[in-house]
Image (cartoon, helix red, strand yellow):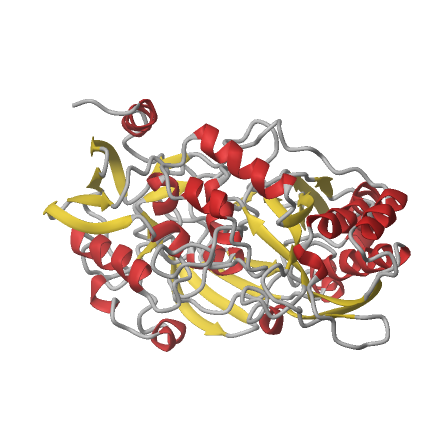
Amino acid sequence: MSLTPTLEMARKAGLGLLLGIAIPSMAMAADSSLTIGMSTTFTTVDPHETSSSPNNAASRHIFDSLINRGGAAENNPQLATDWKVVDPTHWEFHLRKGVKFHDGTTFDAEDVIASLLRARDKPSQAFASYTRNIKDVTESDPYTVVVETTVPDPMILNSLSRIRIISADHAQDSVADFDSGKAAIGTGPFKFVSYSPGDRLVLERNDDYFAGPSEWKNVTLRMIPDNGARLAALLSGDLDLIETMPAEGVDRVENSDNLQLIRGQSTRLVFLGVNVMDTPTAFITAKDGSKLDKNPLQDERVRRALLMSINRPAIVDRVMQKNGTVADQFVAKGYFGHSDAVKPVKYDPEGAKKLLEDAGWGDGFKMTIQGPAGRYVNDSAVLQAVGQMFSRIGIETSVEVMPWSMYSKKYTTGDYSVFLGSWGINTGEVSNPALAVVAGRDDEKGTGRYNGGGVNDPEINKLLDEAPRKPLLEKVSELTFNKLWILPLHYENVVLAAKKSISYAPRGDKYTLAYDVKSAAN
């Protein structure tokens, strides 16, 4: 068999992984409990309905995947013990034996097939960027499955790590069935107890978990998007650990005898999406409020002027209290698909005014920009700062923020003109965000699911149709950010706070997973 160099590398990487998972040596505490304050609301327990970091992190407590994507973006065995490339479009996975679902039924190939095809075919198409190349899934025997792809896809392991495995018995069940607990039956470290939308998910330990039981008998994930309320609950002792530590509370935590800060790096890119599809676009008018006959954002000079007007270092330093790093492209240097040919855009408000004048918008225009409240680190404050900076170059800017549950329904569908967006690049490479955020929207191909700006660059689309090799992804980065189809702001850092009795290593994808939380004594 002759493989391309990329596929040969993928084969070696897959076969070179450990064939088992270490069992934690800690002794279980009989009555131990853990309560985590989540910074964002997740919207369902159905692991295939909506792909967002809050939803995916929550589902990971109940469900496993074939591949376990580690906190440093590495692929480890989970329900698959090992895998190999059969030929350029067929991957074979050997499944872990002896694994039970929470209801006592046995896990096997039938469950993998049902789960991967359900995620691929679900009407919401939320996981299309991960399942787009899956042609079929078949079993060779009860503990061997073959995933057939439409094209050679060396990134398939990254994609499969995002798809949770459910019981085939519940593959036809509704979202409501999962949210009620009827269908929320996985093989994961915790069992479903109850789910109160917008409030909490209550879990109990799976004592028979194949990787070893958690230290925590009872776990509660409380959704508290308000920074002040989340911090207050930690200070009062109601929470053991909180996500997205508010900058204004850092001193109180650092000066506390029983609390600590936990810091780490993140791969989450925060950006401004720009509507380049509509003429005119809904939230841009002339300064007198009258309708325009064209869309300024379709001119690259205007998009460049917008980014030049934003003092990103100041936003990271002051608004985010240094809990971020200025970004110029999807991934930082060292990640797969980063390109040195992307030209960083420097803060230059006078140059921005000149560009607007050159583009025929020297008198500016009026614009409303939208974003969520409590979804990203200091998101409302970041958006307010950006709005003020736009106004300084002659674009009268109003800012509208709203709860994530309201905002998320519209920001991917082109309803806004300029909007705050983000993508957690959990696979550590460029094809993942590019397929979702800047690829042309194509339901059959599964691309552009979160392309709220209507970007449809034929050259980018063509590159993303090919196998995701390094030079192609570098070119995608160049086209995206030298044309400024989206305006990069910063990578978020991970800042949590916890009781000193807690030990936790933050993940690059910003998932907060109770199974990884330990007692400091351990």
Residue 411 lies, in percent from the top left, at 59, 66
Q: Residue at x 25, y 71 (%)?
A: 172
Using the image, determine if residue 458 lies above or below residue 441: above
In this rendering, position of residue 464 left or right of residue 457 = left
In this rendering, position of residue 308 left or right of residue 222 = right
Of 292 and 190, nearer the camera is: 292
Using the image, determine if residue 101 lies above or below residue 338: below
Residue 285 lies, in percent from the top left, at 77, 71
Q: Residue at x 56, y 73 (%)?
A: 198
**Quick one: which residue is furthest to the left in this view?**
141
Dividing the picture into quadrants, the one containing residue 125 is bottom left
Residue 370 lies, in percent from the top left, at 70, 66
Using the image, determine if residue 103 lies above or below residue 465: below
Q: Residue at x 20, y 51 (%)?
A: 136
Q: Residue at x 82, y 58 (%)?
A: 361
Using the image, determine if residue 43 lies above or below residue 327: below
Q: Is residue 31 in sight in this rendering? A: no
Dividing the image into 4 quarters, which one contains the N terminus?
A: top left
